[in-house]
């Protein structure tokens, strides 16, 4: 029995022989059946080259795609048993997304972008504005609340995206190449912010092709040709 099991905790993410296969002919295996547990408060990185299967894994974990085999449990709930509306609600409540391209609305302020993101998580309307402000303060942008994304630097835009992702207190922060559009100095700042969020108890999963980013994780997984393995520190 592991320490986690002994403590009675359940994984945030649990994959049981989960795989993804696209129909042919010939059929394409995007993700070979794999088992994975990620526990509350872990910082896990997944590294692999382009076309290795990172996006397939991210889309399954993020409830953007359904696995074609196996079972995926998020916060203990078997996602295969959920209808689309239930999956959408669970995604909005439990997962915060950070993408390489930021995905901010250009004609909305930083404050409004974060506030709008809270709608999908079910935050009551009267709480959204204060909650969004608190999230921006948390990432060091209290002086840029009313700035439009077009006036922000790349690092500031990614911090707005992180604020939007964590504002609703999700159980999982899922990051897809979060430093891909940033210079090295700005990337280091964003990674330090992820370290801070992890130190506060956030469960963080970062998908990357960059080994230096992957090494920031406390646990590193590798994916190649659709096969997921755990890297052993040397």
Image: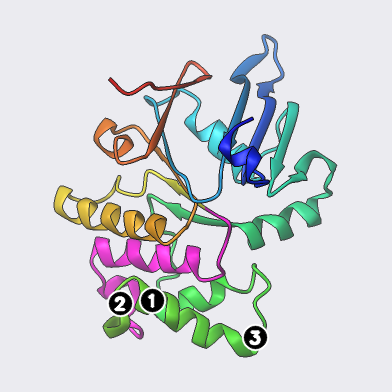
Gap between marks 3 and 2 measured at Cα: 22 Å
**Residue at point 29%, 81% (across, down):** 144
Disc number for residue 125: 3
- Identify the element where label 2 is drawn: loop
Q: Which residues are magenta?
A: 145-172
* Tag 1 residue: 136
Q: Nearer the viewer, residue 146 or 200?
A: 200
Q: Earlier in the sequence, mark 1 or mark 3?
A: 3
User: How many angstroms separate mark 2 from mark 1 (CA)?
Assistant: 5 Å
Disc marking residue 164:
none
Q: Nearer the viewer, residue 218 or 45?
A: 218
Look at the numbered discs 2 and 1 and tell me whether their residues touch, using CB distance below 8 Å.
yes
Give the x, y percent position of residue 228. 51, 21
Q: Residue at x 39, y 22 (%)?
A: 231
Q: Is residue 199 above or below residue 56?
A: below
Q: SS class of the residue under badge 3?
A: helix
Marks 3 and 2 close (CB-CB < 8 Å):
no
Crowd rating for badge 3 (residues with CA inside 10 Å; few <14, some 14–19, many 20+): few
Using residue 25 as the reference point, say whether residue 223 is left or right of it: left
Residue highlighted by disc 2: 141
Mark 2, Cα crowd under 10 Å, few <14 / some 14-19 / many 20+, is: many
Q: Earlier in the sequence, mark 2 or mark 1?
A: 1
* Residue 37 location (% of width, % of height): 59, 34
Looking at the rendered structure, the secondary structure element under dot 1 is helix
State which quarter of the image contains the C terminus: top left
Task: State the image coordinates of residue 195 (x, y, percent, origin top left).
Answer: 33, 54
Residue 209 is one of the magenta-drawn residues: no
Front-lying residue, 24 or 75: 75
């Amino acid at each position: 029995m592991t320490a986690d099991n002994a403590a009675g905790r359940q994984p945030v993410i649990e994959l049981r022989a989960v795989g993804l296969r696209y129909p042919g002919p010939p059929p394409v295996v995007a993700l070979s059946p794999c088992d994975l547990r990620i526990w509350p408060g872990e910082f896990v990185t997944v590294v692999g080259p382009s076309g290795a299967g990172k996006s397939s894994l991210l889309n399954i974990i993020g409830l953007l795609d359904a696995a074609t085999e196996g079972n995926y449990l998020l916060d203990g709930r078997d996602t295969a048993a959920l209808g689309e509306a239930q999956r959408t609600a669970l995604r909005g409540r439990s997962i915060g997304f950070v993408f390489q391209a930021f995905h901010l609305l250009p004609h909305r302020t930083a404050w409004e972008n974060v506030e709008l993101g809270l709608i999908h998580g079910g935050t009551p309307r009267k709480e959204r504005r204060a909650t969004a402000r608190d999230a921006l303060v948390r990432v060091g942008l209290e002086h840029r609340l009313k700035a439009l994304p077009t006036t922000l630097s790349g690092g500031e835009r990614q911090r707005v995206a992180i604020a939007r992702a964590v504002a609703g207190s999700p159980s999982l922060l899922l990051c897809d190449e979060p430093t891909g559009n940033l210079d090295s100095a700005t990337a280091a700042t964003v990674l330090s912010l992820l370290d801070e969020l992890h130190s506060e108890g956030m469960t963080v999963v970062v998908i990357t092709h960059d080994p230096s980013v992957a090494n920031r994780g406390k646990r590193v997984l590798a994916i190649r040709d659709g096969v997921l393995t755990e890297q052993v520190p040397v």
